[in-house]
Amino acid sequence: MQEKIVILTGAGISAESGIRTFRDNGGLWEEHRIEEVATPEAFQRDPVKVHQFYNQRRRQLHGPAIAPNPAHQALARLEAALPDQVLLVTQNVDNLHERAGSRNLIHMHGELCKARCRTTDGLVTVDDELSTGLACPLCGVPGCLRPHVVWFGEMPLEMDRIYAALAGCERFISIGTSGNVYPAASFVAEARASGAHTVELNLEPSEQLSTFHEHHHGPATQQVPEYVE
Ligand code: BJW
């Protein structure tokens, strides 16, 4: 039987590529209040501040210093070695998994390099900055585009496909996530209830530790290649 594997990744897998996590020491939520930058209400109240937060992160992602690390690369090799068996679900809005070569990938919390037209729901690629004065290329209305990210209180993307994969997988591997944010934090319980073997690879024990059958702690660039290869 070909084993079906679902892999969930969080900010920890990109930490060693130079991208800040959210809740660690030095994480993004130390400098920015969630209610001011990561809710639909925040965007309605102060779109300039929210655009600044995401523009700054997009600029960093496009900079020469940021590149996929050995953990992203190991997951891309795993997918290539096991065609049609691996689904990668990332909570990250960066593009390091695709830059490493992963293709069967769901960005459940959206993508930093895309924006959404609030009139048509269509997506556009963003290479540069979003602003309140920018005319939307899809509907023409200035300031219509919003970052294509999932804020608190919004529904994460492609949930039907994710739940179907969790119900049908034999192995669930969680990498570099604190297990604080739902619904991603409950995926391990879903997979386990469906009979999957569940594995955590994280720098330190996560909030969901007791639900995993197996756990290995340490930096992703060591733990991931070691576990998957
Ligand atoms: C390393 C490492 C290294 C570091 N190597 N590891 C009460 C109870 C339950 C739920 C709720 C509740 N009240 C509200 C809710 C729902 C809410 C929620 O979960 N709130 C909690 C805070 C309680 N969730 C939502 O609103 C979500 N929507 C929703 O629930 O819709 C309804 C629904 C119901 C049922 C089914 C389906 C839907 C939406 C959540 C949106 C989250 N958005 C953000 C921002 C996205 C855009 C952006 O990037 O700005 O997503 S918040 C932020 O947290 C971001 C991340 O994807 C997400 C998770 O963070 P992550 O990846 O875990 O990062 P950290 O920093 O927390 O952890 C890093 C980990 O890495 C640590 O463990 C380190 O140890 C480790 N690490 N270096 C390996 N080198």
Image: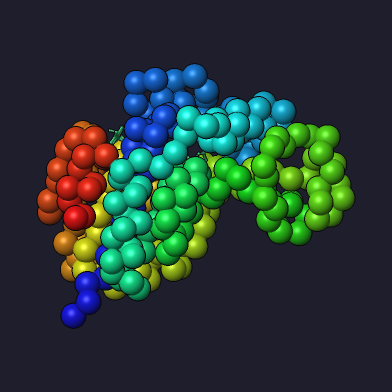
Residue 44 picture location, percent across and down? 71, 36
Q: Is residue 65 left or right of residue 203?
A: right
The image position of residue 22, as x and y in percent, is 42, 31
- Residues 216 and 63: in front is 63
Q: Residue furthest front?
A: 64
**Does residue 32 lie above or below 164 as drawn?**
above
Q: How is the image coloured?
A: rainbow
Asked if residue 10 lies left or right of residue 154, the reply is left
Q: Residue at the left extreme?
A: 214
Question: Which quarter is ligand 1 in?
Answer: top left
Residue 70 appears at what percent x and percent y?
A: 31, 43
Question: Which residue does the image show at 24% across and 35% down from the upper left?
Answer: 219
The residue positioned 34% from the left and 49% from the top of the image is 73
Residue occupying image coordinates x 76% and y 59%: 120
Q: Residue at x 84, y 43 (%)?
A: 135
Specify whether residue 66 is in view.
Answer: yes
Q: Is residue 135 left or right of residue 108?
A: right
**Hey, which quadrant is residue 105 in on the image?**
bottom left
